[in-house]
Image: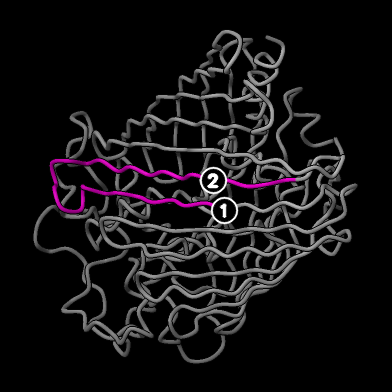
Amino acid sequence: MQLGRCLMLVALFALLAGEAVATPIYAARSARTCDNCHVTPKEWDNPPLAERKCNMSCQSCHVDPAGGGMRNASGRYFGRSTLSMIATSPRPTNDWDRNVSFVGRRDRATTYNDDLPLGPKTFEEAAAFADAVNDGWAWGTPLGAPTRYGLLAGRYGTLNPDPVFRVGTDVRFAALLSGSLAFPMQIDIPVVFHPVHHFTVLANTGARGRPSGYSDTFDQDHSFYLREAFAMVHEAPYQAYVKAGRFVPSFGLRLDDHTALIRRGFELDGALPESRVSGVEVGAMPNYPFLNASWFRMAARQRVPDAWDITDVDDGWGSAINAGWRDLSWSVGASALIRRRPIPEGGDTSSYGVYGVVNPWRRWRFVPLTYQFEYDYGSFQRSSGAESQQAALYQEIQWVAANGVTLLAAHDWEDPDTEIVDDEAHRLQTGVQVSPISGVTLDGRFRVLVPAVGSADSDIFLQLHLWQ
């Protein structure tokens, strides 16, 4: 009984910190029509494979190729054209008749006729569109001639596709209705500096939310810290890259719900400084296949690393690999992650996962449905040195009822220690996400935690997410 109550408390109060991360289900859903992510090109000549930037991977929408955090021009365009009830970039033609009734066809940037904006036909034509850029969140053009591997002017409306300097925001306010608990969940200010083509520096400063309110969020130690801080060489053939600095290892689906049971038990909770590592990651995403691998050092499992010193690590080391194929209506992937460190620092762990997404909406316009899942299994060491195993499952289904309105249902399960009887737990949730305009998302969830022993507990979780 006591174990069940503890599990319920952990699940509820895990909500007290957050991070803006990638949403893989968006990537899968965007594949149903090309003008989700960019202006329709005029008789676009498909470039050779090495030069193609179109893929269903995290890199399509985020500055960090492994996903999460600041969005690039493609991700911002997707938010303006597709995610919101009111479009501020041209609405995809397949979505013209999917607005909710009280919105109708009053989108600001869509004419609803054949006179839609057209992007450049070739790489050479892209330069002519540079004068049309009018972007209040990104400035400048990197030194040197445009690269064929970077995002091109004219493909993303008036957005600056390849700026020298870019500032973003991710702010979340949350409330648990039981107990009337309201708190700041996340405050992130990511900054990108891209002085020359093929080289970028990213620094994301974030604040951890505190259940005791706003003052503790800003005053307590480690409230503010560098979530990510790395230098990256990129815009290479086949969308290859190398980055070095502080980051979360790439593993499985990088969900926007950091409380998912497939994350915290495997030391991958994006809200915690302890999940960050310092190392090197390399990868490539040539159209549909993807691969990234990393080697890193990290702080001891129970020690919070220095908020600003990204070299603050202990004796252990680790490595991760994440690979698979993300196609237009489906994807599959597999991940492996090992950590090797002394037992006082957390001991050795080995984690393995398989995951996938199915998007029938790509083939059937009347089925706006997307499903994703992940199953993870791994081993860890106790303080005695004995080895045990753990497992977790996540699955989610989303139905896009109308532009800007999504219904969802999700199921988590975990067995945090296979040697302990009756420590498993299920978490069921259903909810709705509403995005009235780009950069604003309202998320409401009804959650039920069902432990193996003890009674179930439930709550209603509300979140306001402001992003740019």
**Amino acid, disc 1:** Tyr
Q: Which segment is the magenta one?
A: 352-380
In the image, residue 44 sits, relative to residue 297, either above or below, namely below
Magenta segment, principal secondary structure? strand
Per the image, label 2 sits on a secondary structure element best described as strand
* Mark identifier at residue 352: 1
State which quadrant residue 277 falls in.
Answer: bottom right
**Amino acid, disc 2:** Asp
In the picture of the structure, the residue carrying the numbered disc 2 is 376
Please name whichever residue, 403 or 16, is drawn nearer the observer in this view of the structure: 16
- Tell me what residue is drawn at x 38 percent, y 44 percent: 372
Per the image, label 1 sits on a secondary structure element best described as strand
Q: Is residue 358 magenta?
A: yes
Please name whichever residue, 272 or 353, is drawn nearer the observer in this view of the structure: 353
Residue 285, percent from left and from top: 44, 73
Residue 40, percent from left and from top: 22, 68
Give the side of residue 415 with respect to residue 441, left or right: right
Give the side of residue 319 with respect to residue 327, left or right: right
Contact between marks 1 and 2 (CB within 8 A): the answer is yes
* Mark identifier at residue 151: none
The quadrant in which the N terminus is found is: top right
In the image, residue 320 sits, relative to residue 131, either above or below, namely above
